[in-house]
C-alpha cells in the first residue's frame, strides 16, 4: 500500500512510501480502507518538524475517514462495511483527559496518521459517520469539528440565546458557527475580507466584523451586545487574539482557546477582574465525537470544504493550506 511519510522537516520532506498492507486485525482491532483525509494547521507544525521528527518516517495527518473492511475477534462497535472516521486521540474514549492518555494525537508525536491507504486500529479509534456525509466530508470531522463541539458544549453548555463569538474562516471557526446555530445561539463572527464575511453570513452568522477595518473588534462586540459581551468566545489566535477575546467576553463568560495561530498567549488580568473561565482544548474524546455525530446527523449539517486534492498532490494541498487563502477544510482524496 501507499502512504505519506515525513522523512525530513518541511513539506518537501514528504515522500510516498510503498509498504505491505496490514495483516489480519487482531483482537479488538479493525482494518480501515482509507478514502479521504483532511488538513489542519497542526499538520503544518508536524511537517515543519515541531511534532514527530524524533520518529523516523512518521505517517502524517490526524484526520481521515474510510470503510471498515475487516474486524478482529471481540469487535462489537463496528462491522465490515461501516463508514467511519478515525479519532484524533487514540485512547481517549470518555471522561477526563489524564496524563495516562496518549496526548500526542494521531499524525504526530509518534502516532501514525491518516494519509495512507489502510489503517489498522483499535475499534475504539473509530466513530461511525453520519449517513448523509461523503467520505470527504467525514474526513473533516475528527479534529476541527470535535474541537468546536467541545468548545461549545463539553466545559459548559451553550444555551439558546447565548452569544458566541468566533474568529476567522478556518475549519474550527466554521464548525463553531454551524454548531453554535444548532444550539440556538446568536453568532458574531470576525474575518478579514468581504468575501469571507459573506460566507460566514451564509453559514448562519448573525453579525460579522471585519477586523482589518475594525482592529478594536472587542469594542464592536461589546457594542453589538449592549455592553454585555459574548457568553462564549472560541479563540483560535492565541497570542494574537486572546487579550481581545478576554475583553469581548461578558462578566463570568467563557473563552475556549482552541488554537495558537499567532503563538503562545500571555494570560491577561481580565480573567481575575471579570471572573472569566479560560478553557484550553485538546480536541475531544470518542464520546464527544459520537455525541457530535448524532447532532450532525439529526440536523443534516454539512461541513464546508474549500478544495479536494488527489492523493498524489498531497504536498500541494499542504502548500494551499499554508497560503491561508482557504475558506473551509482542505481535503485529500485517497481512494
Image (cartoon, rainbow, N blue to C red):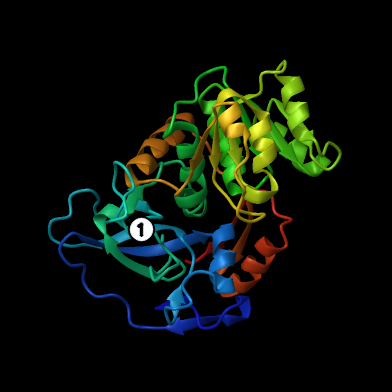
Q: In this view, does 146 lie to the left or right of 48?
A: left
Residue 17 in percent (x, y) is at 46, 83
Q: In this view, does 30 lie to the left or right of 142?
A: left
Quarter holding residue 68: bottom left
Above or below for 20 versus 240:
below
Tell me what residue is drawn at x 45 percent, y 67 percent: 108
Label 1 packing within 10 angstroms: few (<14), some (14-19), many (20+): many
Residue extending farthest right? 213
Observer-nearest of 159 and 232: 232
Tell me what residue is drawn at x 33 percent, y 59 percent: 102
Tell me what residue is drawn at x 83 percent, y 36 percent: 214
Observer-nearest of 109 and 68: 109
Observer-nearest of 25 and 91: 91
* Figure quadrant of the N terminus: bottom left
Quarter holding residue 114: bottom left
Residue 141 in percent (x, y) is at 48, 48
Residue at image mark 1? 67
Query: Can residue 134 be seen in the rendering of this structure?
Result: no
Residue 47 in percent (x, y) is at 56, 72
Above or below for 52 versus 305:
below
Q: What element carries label 1?
A: strand
Q: Is residue 209 left or right of residue 80?
A: right
Residue 129 in percent (x, y) is at 39, 46
Amino acid at each position: 500500500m501507499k502512504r505519506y511519510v515525513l522523512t525530513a522537516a518541511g513539506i518537501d520532506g514528504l515522500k510516498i512510501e510503498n509498504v505491505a498492507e496490514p495483516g489480519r486485525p487482531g483482537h479488538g482491532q479493525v482494518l480501515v480502507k482509507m478514502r479521504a483525509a483532511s488538513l489542519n494547521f497542526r499538520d503544518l507544525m508536524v511537517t515543519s518538524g515541531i511534532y514527530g521528527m524524533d520518529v523516523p518516517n512518521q505517517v502524517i495527518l490526524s484526520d481521515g475517514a474510510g470503510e471498515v473492511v475487516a474486524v478482529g475477534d471481540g469487535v462489537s462497535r463496528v462491522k465490515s462495511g461501516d463508514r467511519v472516521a478515525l479519532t484524533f486521540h487514540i485512547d481517549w474514549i470518555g471522561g477526563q483527559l489524564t496524563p495516562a492518555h496518549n496526548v500526542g494525537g494521531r499524525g504526530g508525536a509518534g502516532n501514525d496518521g491518516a494519509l495512507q491507504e489502510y489503517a489498522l486500529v483499535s475499534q475504539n479509534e473509530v466513530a461511525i459517520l453520519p449517513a448523509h456525509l461523503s467520505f470527504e466530508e467525514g474526513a473533516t470531522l475528527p479534529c476541527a469539528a470535535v474541537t468546536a463541539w467541545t468548545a461549545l458544549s463539553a466545559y459548559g453548555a451553550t444555551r439558546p440565546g447565548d452569544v458566541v463569538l468566533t474568529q476567522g474562516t478556518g475549519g474550527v471557526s466554521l464548525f463553531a458557527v454551524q454548531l453554535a446555530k444548532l444550539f440556538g445561539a446568536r453568532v458574531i463572527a470576525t474575518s478579514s475580507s468581504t468575501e469571507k464575511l459573506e460566507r460566514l453570513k451564509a453559514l448562519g452568522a448573525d453579525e460579522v466584523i471585519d477586523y482589518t477595518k475594525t482592529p478594536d473588534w472587542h469594542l464592536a462586540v461589546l457594542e453589538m451586545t449592549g455592553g454585555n459581551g459574548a457568553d462564549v468566545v472560541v479563540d483560535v489566535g492565541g497570542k494574537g487574539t486572546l487579550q481581545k477575546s478576554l475583553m469581548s467576553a461578558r462578566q463570568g463568560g467563557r473563552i475556549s482557546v482552541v488554537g495558537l495561530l499567532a503563538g503562545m498567549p500571555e494570560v491577561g488580568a481580565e480573567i481575575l477582574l471579570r471572573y472569566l473561565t479560560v478553557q484550553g482544548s485538546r480536541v475531544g474524546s470518542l464520546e464527544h465525537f459520537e455525541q457530535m455525530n448524532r447532532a450532525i446527523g439529526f440536523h443534516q449539517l454539512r461541513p464546508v470544504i474549500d478544495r479536494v486534492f488527489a492523493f498524489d498532490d498531497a504536498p500541494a494541498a499542504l502548500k494551499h493550506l499554508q497560503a491561508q487563502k482557504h475558506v473551509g477544510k482542505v481535503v485529500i482524496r485517497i481512494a
